[in-house]
Image (cartoon, rainbow, N blue to C red):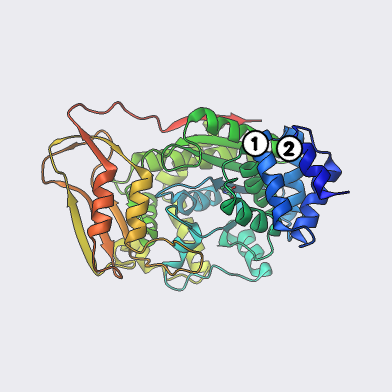
């Protein structure tokens, strides 16, 4: 087989065979094929697309390029979730213990943040003592015992994706549906769960800017699941505005705990998405009706069962649980500043990408993989879409322990708020569910 012929075939709009796709993934991952040929093929795929059958084979080939996790001992109860990346997305911190409280088994490997979106592992590392790396037998035993464990991704999980993603990042080939779908689903398949719920974000802070594009991505991933014998469903959710009110690692952990504690001022949108995700997981894994599953999830959140599970989980992984009773004690920032409204009116929109960028400027995220993080840093929204604000009243608070000059972050955060004379139309939170 020749790499040249495969590039030429895809360039001209042909359908690649299973053996051509597997050969390409193998050649490139093992270092036998050069970056320039892989780049040319990625661009041809970007421009010409892939059929569902090609995308499923690409996903499977990538999945098999490294370690895979065997969760068969948990049978149908093994569940996983994935979000396509958002600002203020702390859903795993709530959904993982919530699913465990419903009797499901969550053996989860999470990623770190890069750019303006955060990663669950960084959030968990803001908890003193929490171990994000566990030996495999301890990880499995914890899931067996309490139903949930969350660790960082193993170094050799889908090496093909690590190489291909790095190449896509520098060749303008990231935003291709078959390439995004195979990248995400190869990692989910390798992580072993039989039931997978995806949260596909739509909006300014997301990869997919319209519900139509997001639905296409979701359908592609659900179809990959069906072809690879996994149960997959996807929620399409709004990422025009940040999820919840906190953006930044420890701030998001605190917000998650406040929600699990049932605090009355916790964010309704965040609660709805978490209940819907856990409900979908239970529906797939237990084979029960979606409404019944969602009701069970809501009850487990309201009864405190999910909070109890959260405590068990954090403690099992070595975390100091003191903050669960007093969330404000987790990584307090040494400096804070308030951004105020330039005029009175109604908050029309809060640009998620802008708030994510402001949090980064305060030290909450990384520009490059090797950068450090200020766990205390971030943005707390005081108002959200549809709320009334008076001139000079707080729009958001900026927090940091490492940055002295808040002016860049303040300007960026202020620009994210659009205030208008009319109340904004209510935004949809969940655009729909895509199922097999
Ligand atoms: N997330 C991934 O893991 N891969 C992509 O290609 C895009 C988002």
Label number found at residue 323: none
Question: Could you tell me residue 226's position as x and y percent?
Answer: 72, 36
In terms of depth relative to the viewer, which is nearer, 255 or 119? Answer: 119
| Whether residue 410 is visible | yes
Residue shown at the point (22%, 59%) measured from the top left: 407
In the image, farthest residue toward the left? 391
Relative horizontal placement of residue 246, taking residue 46 as reference (left or right): left
SS at mark 2?
helix
Callout 1: few (<14), some (14-19), or many (20+) C-alpha neighbours within 10 Å?
some
Quadrant housing residue 180: top right
Q: Is residue 20 left or right of residue 159?
A: right
Give the side of residue 276 with respect to residue 384, left or right. right
Q: Position of residue 394 (x, y in %)?
A: 17, 48
Query: In the figure, 71 relative to 368: above or below?
Result: above
Depth order, front residue of 354/308: 354
Q: Residue at x 69, y 40 (%)?
A: 44
Quadrant (top left/top right/bottom left/bottom right) for the C terminus? top right
Residue under the point 65% across and 71% down = 135
SS class, disc 1: helix
Q: What is the CA distance from the residue labelled 2 to the residue labelled 1?
A: 8 Å
Count of all numbered marks drawn on residues in the image: 2
Q: Tell me whether circle 2 and circle 1 mark residues in contact (CB < 8 Å).
A: yes
Which residue does the numbered mark 1 point to in the structure image?
47
Name above or below for residue 231 compared with residue 98: above
Residue 251 appears anywhere in the view: no
Using the rendered view, name the quadrant where residue 264 is placed: top left
* Disc 2 target residue: 11
Disc 2 residue crowd, few under 14, some 14–19, many 20+, Cα 10 Å: some
Relative to 110, say whether 44 is above or below: above
Which of marks 1 and 2 precedes in the sequence?
2
């Amino acid at each position: 087989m020749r790499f040249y012929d495969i590039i030429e075939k895809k360039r001209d709009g042909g359908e690649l065979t299973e053996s051509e796709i597997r050969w390409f993934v193998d050649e490139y991952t093992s270092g036998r094929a050069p970056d320039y040929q892989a780049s040319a093929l990625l661009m041809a795929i970007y421009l010409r697309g892939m059929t569902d059958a090609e995308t499923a084979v690409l996903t499977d080939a990538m999945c098999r390029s490294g370690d895979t996790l065997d969760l068969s001992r948990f049978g149908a109860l093994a569940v996983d979730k994935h979000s396509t990346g958002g600002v203020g997305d702390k859903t795993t911190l709530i959904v993982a213990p919530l699913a465990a409280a419903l009797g499901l088994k969550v053996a989860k490997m999470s990623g770190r943040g890069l750019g303006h979106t955060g990663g669950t592992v960084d959030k968990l590392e803001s908890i003193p003592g929490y171990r994000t790396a566990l030996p495999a037998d301890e990880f499995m035993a914890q899931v067996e015992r309490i139903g949930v464990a969350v660790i960082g991704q193993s170094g050799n999980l889908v090496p093909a994706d690590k190489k291909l993603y790095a190449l896509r990042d520098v060749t303008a080939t990231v935003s291709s549906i078959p390439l995004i779908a195979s990248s995400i689903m190869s990692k989910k398949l390798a992580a072993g769960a039989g039931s997978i719920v995806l949260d596909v974000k739509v909006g300014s802070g997301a990869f997919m800017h319209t519900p139509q594009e997001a639905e296409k991505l979701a359908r592609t991933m659900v179809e990959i699941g069906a072809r690879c014998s996994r149960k997959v469903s996807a929620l399409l959710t709004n990422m025009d505005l940040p999820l919840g009110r906190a953006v930044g690692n420890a701030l998001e952990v605190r917000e998650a705990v406040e929600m699990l504690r049932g605090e009355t001022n916790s964010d309704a949108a965040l609660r709805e998405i978490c209940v819907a995700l856990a409900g979908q997981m239970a529906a797939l894994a237990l084979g029960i009706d979606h409404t019944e599953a969602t009701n069970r999830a809501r009850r487990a959140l309201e009864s405190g069962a999910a909070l109890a599970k959260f405590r068990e989980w954090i403690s099992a992984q070595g975390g100091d649980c003191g903050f669960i009773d007093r969330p404000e004690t987790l990584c307090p920032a040494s400096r804070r500043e308030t951004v105020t409204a330039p005029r009175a009116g109604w908050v029309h929109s809060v640009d998620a990408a802008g708030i994510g960028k402001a949090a980064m400027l305060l030290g909450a995220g990384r520009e490059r993989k090797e950068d450090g993080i200020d766990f205390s840093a971030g943005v707390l929204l005081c108002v959200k879409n549809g709320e009334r604000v008076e001139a000079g009243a707080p729009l958001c608070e900026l927090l940091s322990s490492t940055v002295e000059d808040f002016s860049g972050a303040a300007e960026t955060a202020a620009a994210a708020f659009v205030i208008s004379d009319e109340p904004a139309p209510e935004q949809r939170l969940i655009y729909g569910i895509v199922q097999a």
